[in-house]
Image: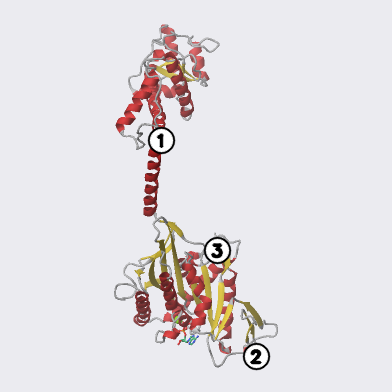
Amino acid sequence: MGTRKKVQAFVRVKPTDDFAHEMIKYGEDNKSIDIHLKKDTRRGAVNNQQTDWSFKLDGVLHDASQDLVYETVAKDAVSQALDGYNGTIMCYGQTGAGKTYTMTGATENYKHRGILPRALQQVFRMIEERPTHAITVRVSYLEIYNENLFDLLSTLPYVGPSVTPMTIVENPQGVFIKGLSVHLTSQEEDAFSLLFEGETNRIIASHTMNKNSSRSHCIFTIYMEAHSRTLSDEKYITSKINLVDLAGSERLSKTGSEGRVLKEATYINKSLSFLEQAIIALGDQNRDHIPFRQSKLTHALKDSLGGNCNMVLVTNIYGEAAQLDETLSSLRFASRMKLVTTEPAINEKYDAERMVKNLEKELALLKQELAIHDSLSNRTLVNYDPMDEIQIAEINSQVRRYLEGTLDEIDIINLRQIQEVFNQFRVVLSQQEQEVESALRRKYTLIDKNDFAAISAVQKAGLMDVEGHLVGEPDGQSFGLGVAPFSVKPGKKSKTKKTTKDQFSSSARKEGASSPVSGKDFDMTSISKTQLIPSSKEGDLKDMLVRERETSSIEPLPSDSPKEESRALSTVI
Ligand code: ADP
Ligand code: MG
């Protein structure tokens, strides 16, 4: 994680012969603007109205060349994008104050080119300086007009809104616009021609759709992906730079606007005020919810406002007295933006394919190493590969023979084999357990020791003496009353199962029993959780016991239908 960083807020003043020197003053360090409003310049101003404001900024650009603006505003953010940090550079301000001039610049004059072409130039220059990395560059150009998304680089001829409307999609990697074309540009010239195409489309669109281009937001994005050329490095970095030319921020007075203009003004006012709200929320450390989804603009920029990116705002203002109201409002926006902190972080990702290759290499090396160790310690050639079915079956048979006592020990060969031996122990035991369980089920109904009613019925029937011992034939042939090691009560199964396994294996091992599945071999005296009672066909154990008592001959009644068996069980449990 990087260190927290404030959003950088610059102000660029549009050159004018009529600069309001008396009202607009810059601080000595050029990092603040003081505004002094003469009372009489404002109609209706009363004496107690505020007339002085002071705004702290990161720099004031007055009469600054395009070159200086780029150096001051964008150079660092673009350079850091190549190291994996996302960056957003945004121009804000009223129409005509110089946002597009700052961002795109004058296309007819190379010297007056703006941030966009200069950023592309810097990116490609830096790529040339980094032969150690394979860096790909892609670009997209999105326009948001009246809450509709337009692709300014659509490969189809521009016909207005795309047939399949674009949507803003969020995934763990970030936010992207589904349907927006993203173009791979392998050299500067490609990027420039795409930029030119986008600008042309922007103008065409403004004519065909009869819209004012200063009423829309435009986002030019440069996406980068840098892979190290050294084969071993499986990490790669991604980043994007958003260059945003916002719609004019001036608030059109509603009385003066109607129809289309009113609609545009409403959308712009809304989206800019949502942008402001999101930014205020971002600047407030106590806010955990940031309302990004309120507008297309904030949603599309969700992972580019605040968060982990370098963020720069250029507020374009007029220097004339007549525009002071709007200038004040723009400066307020800039100072709010300055409160926002971000935490720039590198977007590091892993190249899965490369990772697999590296792991395979590592594995081969370790196998070689192992072979050397084996031969040095005079071990016969040991195979460390995963086992096939035949080998596993052989281990299973060894385990069975070991449990039966016909095999004294199982030779240890390697770790994989030991693990498989344990595995097969589990397999064999659970098979035996199942066999016993079903054998017993066929013979007995189980009584839970806590079921006092059933126990008392058993006692009444004379099947259990007062000390709780069950009376029956010891061989378990006709009435093997003992205790089932496993409770059939749901939820207790796993715990008791373990007991079964332990007892089972120890008794089986001790006695060297040939088949532990037989009811005879089963040590019923040592287990004490559940009592065994013959199953009843009728299902009601107590009735059955009474009847059995009357006939004084108790024979186990095996249930031949599983349905009845379960009924019998459920009445007892
Ligand atoms: P916005 O995009 O904010 O509506 P523009 O960038 O289109 O404003 O600027 C309006 C006009 O002012 C354009 O003709 C532009 O060339 C000119 N202009 C703006 N800023 C400057 C500047 N710093 N130097 C020279 N001309 C500028
Ligand atoms: Mg503009």
Q: Please state the horizontal and vertical placement of residue 449, each as a whole percent of the image.
A: 51, 20
Give the label, 2 or 1, closer to the camera: 1
The amino acid marked with disc number 3 is Glu
413 or 2, which lies in front? Answer: 413
Q: Earlier in the sequence, mark 2 or mark 1?
A: 2
Q: Please state the horizontal and vertical placement of residue 306, each as a whole percent of the image.
A: 53, 66
Look at the numbered disc 2 and give the secondary structure of its residue: helix
Q: Residue furthest bottom?
A: 17
Q: Please state the horizontal and vertical placement of residue 60, each as a whole percent of the image.
A: 58, 81
Q: Find disc 1 in the rendering and name its residue.
A: 376
Look at the numbered disc 1 and give the secondary structure of its residue: helix
The amino acid marked with disc number 1 is Leu
Q: Residue furthest top?
A: 552
530 or 254, which lies in front? Answer: 530
Q: Earlier in the sequence, mark 1 or mark 3?
A: 3
Query: What label does residue 77 carry, if any?
Result: none
189 or 330, which lies in front? Answer: 189
Q: Earlier in the sequence, mark 3 or mark 2?
A: 2
Where is the N terminus found, in terms of image quarters? bottom right
Residue 416 visible in the snapshot: yes
Q: CA distance from mark 3 to mark 2?
A: 45 Å
Residue 249 visible in the snapshot: no
Q: Find disc 2 in the rendering and name its residue.
A: 40
Q: CA distance from mark 1 to mark 3?
A: 55 Å
Look at 63% across and 80% down and name the residue there: 29
Q: Residues within 10 Å of mark 3 (few under 14, many from 20)?
A: some
Find residue 542 and report its image quarter: top left
